[in-house]
Image: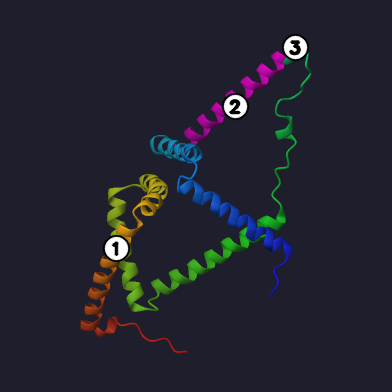
Amino acid sequence: MEIDVPSKCIILNVIINLFSVLDLIYWRDVRKTGVVFGSMMFLLLSLAFFSVLSVVAYLSLAVLTVTLSFRVYKNIMGAVQKSGEGHPFKQYLEADLELPEDKVKPAVENILRHVNCTAKEVRRLFLIEDLVDSIKFGILLWLLTYIGSWFNGMTLIILAVVAVFTLPKVYETYKVQIDNYVGLATTQINKVLSQVQAKVPFLKKKAKTQ
């Protein structure tokens, strides 16, 4: 099946963006990753200590102060030097901010696809389509109650951001050792699950009919 040109462009853009994100996560450019990671941590820590409204107001005020100071400075320099450069932000004011429909529509369709898939999986787990999977899901929810009692939502987000910017790089550096330990742990877990399913027959998954 031949892929049309717009679809090829969308796929190419997705691949390029994916590689850009991976470059950030794996610290390929230390300066760029440091700026992104530092900015995200600053924003998250600000939201952890202040309300969302306060953070948005202060950041907006800071940006407005910078742009206003730069505009006044350029006007003064233009009047002194008589350069007549015009508005310093003219190119940004004339830039097109409208989102192209050909790029927005595939993104929305992709989001809806994931939402529908998630909804079906949640329905399957809550309505006990498979007993083993629902029990595993229940255990996960039980563990989340303990995690929620230890950390609030913002702390979990901060920990997740730190993990995203540290764990992949650590795994890349110590891949062999980590794979060995994960393999041993997986073997032990599978052995325990096999023993439990052997002693409790109703936990065995039913073979799906073709």
Q: Is residue 164 above or below residue 10?
A: above
User: What amino acid is labelled 3 in the image?
Assistant: Gln
Residue 57 among those drawn in magenta = yes
Residue 81 among those drawn in magenta = no
Residue 144 screen position, x and y as percent: 32, 58
Label 2: which secondary element: helix
Q: CA distance from mark 3 to mark 1?
A: 69 Å
Residue at the far top in the pictured view = 80
Are the residues tagged 1 and 2 within 8 Å (C-beta)?
no
- Is residue 43 at all visible to an observer of this figure? yes
| Disc number lying in front (3 or 1) | 1
| Disc number lying in front (1 or 2) | 1
Binning the other alpha carbons within 10 Å of mark 3 as few (below 14), some (14 to 19) or many (20 upward) gives few
Range covered by the magenta-colored residues: 51-77
Q: Which residue is mark 3?
A: 81
Please identify the quarter of the rendering in which residue 1 is found: bottom right
Q: Nearer the viewer, residue 79 or 22?
A: 22
Residue 86 screen position, x and y as percent: 77, 23
Residue pictured at 30% horizontal, 53% vertical:
147
Residue pictured at 62% horizontal, 20% vertical:
69
Q: Which residue is mark 1?
A: 180
Identify the mark nearer the N-term, 3 or 1.
3
- Is residue 153 at all visible to an observer of this figure? no
Label 1: which secondary element: helix
User: What amino acid is labelled 1 in the image?
Assistant: Asn
Q: Which residue is mark 2?
A: 64
Please identify the quarter of the rendering in which residue 188 is found: bottom left
Binning the other alpha carbons within 10 Å of mark 2 as few (below 14), some (14 to 19) or many (20 upward) gives few
